[in-house]
Amino acid sequence: MAGEVHLVEAEFLRRLCARLFESIGVPEEEAIVIADNLVDADLKGNESHGVSRVGIYLKRLRLKLVKPVARLEVIAESPGTALCDACNSMGAVGASKAMELAIKKARQSGMSFVTVRNSNHYSAASYFAQMALPHGMIGFTASNGPPRMAPWGGTDPHFGTDPFAVAIPAGRQLPIIADMATCVVARGKIIMAAKKGEPIPLGWARNADGEDTADANEALAGTVLPFAGPKGYAIATVIEVLTGILSGSRFTRGINDMYANFENPSFTSHYFGALNVEAFSSLAEFAESMDRFIVGVKANTLAKGAREIYLPGEIELRLKEARLKNGIPVSPIVFSELREEAETAGVAWNLD
């Protein structure tokens, strides 16, 4: 879709999105969490998981397919583990509560693993993994989702894109934050291409007939491809076990599509965990070793055409710093959608 890209202050987006969620019954504190989660993705350049998701989140809330007030019920637990039911809460809120529980348990037991069932889409996984960083911990998370990807050698959608993330603290250097889906590209990027009327690169997805396609709409009706072929498929397999199956919930084709099923909850599952660095060594020693590790990686001889060696998440964190100062570029279609949502909800666009 042609038009002008709008440069918008991060705080404006946070306040606008929070008020949109508040307008349909989400408590203020929880609305702020959802808004911060989405804006954080845009700050890092991950627009497919940012405020472009506001519309579908609001639609599902209005249809009462998601409960506006979050509740995380602990079904079973041990000193280092917990099985939780998000009770069909907004994904970002239930996930934040679950990660807080994982951090609390890791503080006592050294490490933790928390599974969550009956949740919803939680946007970018890194948001929750990085919650562990201020506590001197390594954080990790993953989620299953509706069928988008065929098993290796198959043609029918079966696995979700199953994103996962790990966040590792450092000292003077930036933390390492690895965040990725198990497919070649997050399906949200294909959704954005379809919204904008743009083609997608060959190798991202296949159409309903199992053929490579550059048409975003054909791709949405087909399947995304796993990264590194059978390796991405193997990781998706493990994530399905550690989320849906381990939590005693639905998995693979049992997860409902939030963009297509407007009659039932999604039944998404996640896992969260934390490793307390001080259970293994002093935090100061670990941070110093991490700094030396990062400096060593970045000192590697540059390949032809490369300008710098980046650690996982470094580009996104640098971009976040720049966008906090200069604003977030919002595409015309997403900008228009946000305006329409504000008008529908009676939320003032000019927030003071």
Image: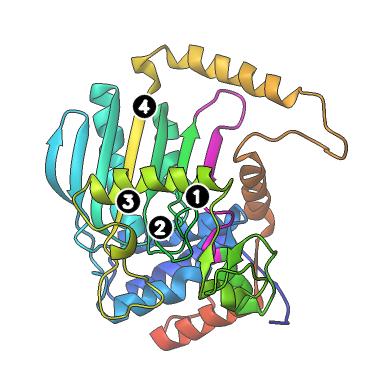
Q: Do the residues under discs 4 and 2 have CB atoms within 8 angstroms?
A: no
Which tag, 2 or 3, sits closer to the chain's start?
3
Task: Point out residue 23 in the picture as x, y percentages from the top left corner.
Answer: 34, 77
Q: CA distance from mark 1 to mark 4?
A: 23 Å
Q: CA distance from mark 4 to mark 2?
A: 28 Å
Q: Do the residues under discs 2 and 3 have CB atoms within 8 angstroms?
A: no
Question: Residue at 34% across / 49% down in the picture?
Answer: 240
Three-letter residue code for mark 4 = Leu
- Residue 182's disc is 1
Disc 2 crowd, CA 10 A, few/some/many (<14, 14-19, 20+):
many
Q: CA distance from mark 2 to mark 3?
A: 21 Å
- Residue 95's disc is 3
Disc 1 crowd, CA 10 A, few/some/many (<14, 14-19, 20+):
many
- Residue 159's disc is 2
Q: Do the residues under discs 1 and 2 have CB atoms within 8 angstroms?
A: yes
Q: Nearer the viewer, residue 241 or 29?
A: 241
Provide the residue designation for mark 4: 275
Q: CA distance from mark 1 to mark 2?
A: 10 Å
**Residue 352 seen:** no
Disc 3 crowd, CA 10 A, few/some/many (<14, 14-19, 20+):
many
Q: What element does badge 4 sit on?
A: strand
Residue depth check, mark 1 versus mark 3: number of the one nearer the observer: 1
